Amino acid sequence: MDDDRPESDDSVITAVEAAVLAFESDHPGHDRLKQQLIRAELELSVASYYQMLSQLIDRPAAWRIAPTCLAALRRARQRRRLTDQQM
């Protein structure tokens, strides 16, 4: 993984990151209602939410909190990458 975060940063999940993981666990999939809930409940833009999820997939501390959710997200990301490579 290529990033400039200090090592200790990977071992700690912020309250916002934990909330995003909990929200994604409770609301898998993609639809307009979910987008509205992201804005209302988490006070994040939809783009920020998905960027954060994408980063959390690679964070060991996140896997200790939501392994099932992150495993599903990692599989989806791998499928997208394979599809992109085939195009």
Image: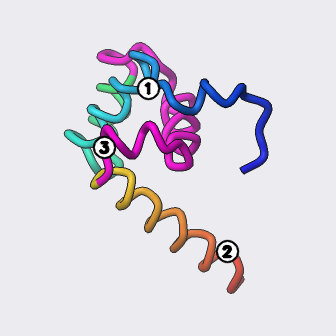
Image quadrant containing the C terminus = bottom right
- The answer to whether residue 61 is above or below residue 58 is above
Looking at the image, tell me whether mark 2 or mark 3 is earlier in sequence order: 3
Amino acid on which disc 2 is placed: Asp
Residue at 54% over, 70% down = 78
| Residue 21 location (% of width, % of height) | 35, 35
Q: Which dot, 2 or 1, sits closer to the camera? A: 1
Distance Cα–Cα, label 1 vs label 3: 11 Å
**Dominant SS type (magenta):** helix
Task: Identify residue for label 3.
Answer: 66
Q: Which quadrant holds residue 54?
A: top right
Task: Identify residue for label 1.
Answer: 17
User: Dot 1 lies on which element?
Assistant: helix
Task: Identify residue for label 2.
Answer: 84
| Residue 20 location (% of width, % of height) | 37, 29
Where does the magenta region start and end? 39-67
Distance Cα–Cα, label 2 vs label 3: 27 Å
Residue at 42% over, 18% down = 16
Residue at 30% over, 43% down = 66
- The answer to whether residue 70 is above or below residue 25 is below
